[in-house]
Amino acid sequence: MKTIYAVLALSIASAAFSQKMLEKVEPAFWWKGMKNPELQILVYGKGVANNEVTLSDGIQIKNLQKVENPNYLFITVNTNEINVPKFTINIKNGKKNIGSYSYELKQRNSGSADRSSFTSKDVMYLIMPDRFANGDEKNDSRPDLTEKADRNLPNGRHGGDLRGIINNLDYIQKLGATAVWLTPVNEDNEKVYSYHGYAQTDLYKIDGRYGTNEDYRTLSRELNKRHMMLVMDYVTNHWGVSHWMIKDLPTKDWIHWFNDGENGFKRSNYKITSQFDTNASEIDKKYALDGWFDTTMPDINQKNPLVLKYLTQNAIWWIEYAELGGFRVDTYPYNDKEAMAKWAKAITEEYPKFNIVGETWLSTAGHISAWQKNSKTGEAAGYNSNLPSVMDFILFGEMPKAFHEKESWNGGMNRIYDSFTSDFLYPDVNNLLVFFENHDTERWNEIFNADPKAYKLGLTLISTTRGIPQIYYGSEIGMRGDKKKGGDTDIRRDFPGGWKSDKQNAFNLSAQTPQQKDFFQYTQKLLNWRKGKEVIHSGKTKNFAPQDGVFTYFRYNEKESVMVMINNNDKDQTVDLKHFAESLNGFTKGKDIIADKEFTFQNTIAIPAKTSFIIELEK
């Protein structure tokens, strides 16, 4: 931390370290044919702004912006006016050419602008790459990156990488997932605790311990061949303290820092509800949005137009280069909301089908829904986020309580029912990410003591309700992790079989234990059934208030109807079917897709304890 504080204390105009002319050019290349032809090129080198800049082939510079730090230049060109595949950026001192860079404008892939993205047809599989599988032991540690691999350190680098994921795509595909969300894999060159990737130090470079940019694109293409897709975890709110731009800030206001804080630092108060609170104090809003998420994560100032342009172009660059199928954006409400509305709009205008889900960790549906595009709650606050999708943290929060509790007026399965009563707040309820755990939360199988019945109930719910189901690696084989006792590292355990030295390989279905098979086979059957069910992807929902701990709802459209029953009781229950007459009208039988059991509807239906039915209705 001393490095950044020293830089902040000095004049921005002084260089933090010696460097060659044109040490960096970002983005390193671009594409012709973008809907927005404007391209801003960052040029970095010691004292570069003190020299003359010219472009070859008669290309005109539309804007040349200098900033406080003479080590930076921002060159804007119109790519529609450039008719050569490559041109040269020249840095001249008088008549002497002291630096040059050959800039390439590539041709876009056919259909790039109409790239498909994740929707409610998909199931998202979340992986923490360092803990999943080690496919290339040679990149576990690298001389150019500080932290070395040591699997004995709970919070250290363990060696999982992109090649390990590529090697196990058959497993993920057989499971039934169709989209793969990786926690950040861009370079995170912090001294310790770098495996999580959220303190990025280079936004245009994959961390060498995971592989290369080419490996990342290969993973995406291998997924696309399987009619699957790669979702990038994008971080706009903060960078790592060791980021090269943080070490030598372009402008003082590139990041947020506090004159009255210790060395300029103050931690966020995390009161992100202040974004829409009409009664919030200005100091609370400032600490929420400008405070740092952690000591090693400087808070980025998206209000700075240069910062916003940098983040926007970087996001578009990765979509185009890696052929991505979506973004999940970290800590979304901690960003400046007006700037992020511009960011999301720029991306979705370039790629109209591209989906972006924001991590909106808030405690009310009103607050969460305000972050979804065209939300009435957002509109009431004079805001439209342009963000297509948000995460359903309400359902997430209620699920473990509901499945633990005995039934009561507002407890047990009534919690689930009540959470769905806020669906009217969301402009696109099918574009919610639904989940019961992720890399930041307690493992579901820890909460329920690895009880497969509890897992099956939870998975049934998120897989058959509205929205996009997301599951966390390893839960499909019963993996546990105690966040309360073991911290984040315990909920991010290594997947068994991801390393050559592992005693057991759970990627090999025939080598799974009986318990692992029980978890996996249920997940596999449910998710693969879900793939072809338009009624689940976009059908309507009718919920019936729980009765005696049994929650029943119907997913239906003009062609078909599915009846879902979840019995959370410790005892078998007999349910009166007359109560569901409005949804069963015309249907006389059905088949449970999990047990392959057929039902002929009489007056009642018996459902065993801690069991769910997913019944395709027939006339």
Image (cartoon, grey):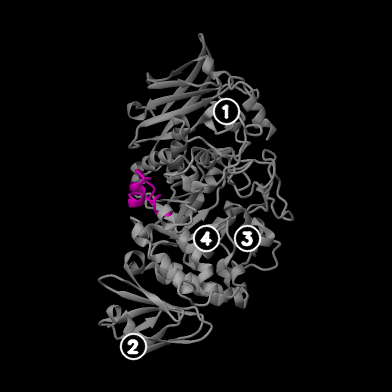
- What residue would you read off at disc 1? 249
Mark before the other along the chain sequence, 3 or 1: 1
Mark before the other along the chain sequence, 4 or 1: 4
- What residue would you read off at disc 4? 169
Where residue 278 appears, x then y in whole percent? 41, 44
| Residue 613 in the image: above or below residue 91 | below
Horizontally, is 424 left or right of 520 in the view? left
Residue placed most toward the observer, 281 or 13: 281
Report the residue at 64% width, 60% height from top: 483
Q: Amino acid at mark 4?
A: Leu
**Boundaries of the magenta span:** 368-388
Q: Amino acid at mark 1?
A: Leu
Q: Is residue 332 visible?
A: no
Is residue 363 on the magenta stretch? no
Mark before the other along the chain sequence, 2 or 4: 4
| Residue 143 in the image: above or below residue 162 | above
Q: Secondary structure at mark 4?
A: helix
Mark before the other along the chain sequence, 3 or 4: 4
- What residue would you read off at disc 2? 601
Instruction: Please state, as top left, top right, bottom left or bottom right, where the C terminus lies in the image.
Output: bottom left
Q: Are marks 3 and 4 in contact (CB under 8 Å)?
A: no
Q: Amino acid at mark 3?
A: Ile
Disc number at residue 491? 3
Q: In front: mark 2 or mark 4?
A: 2
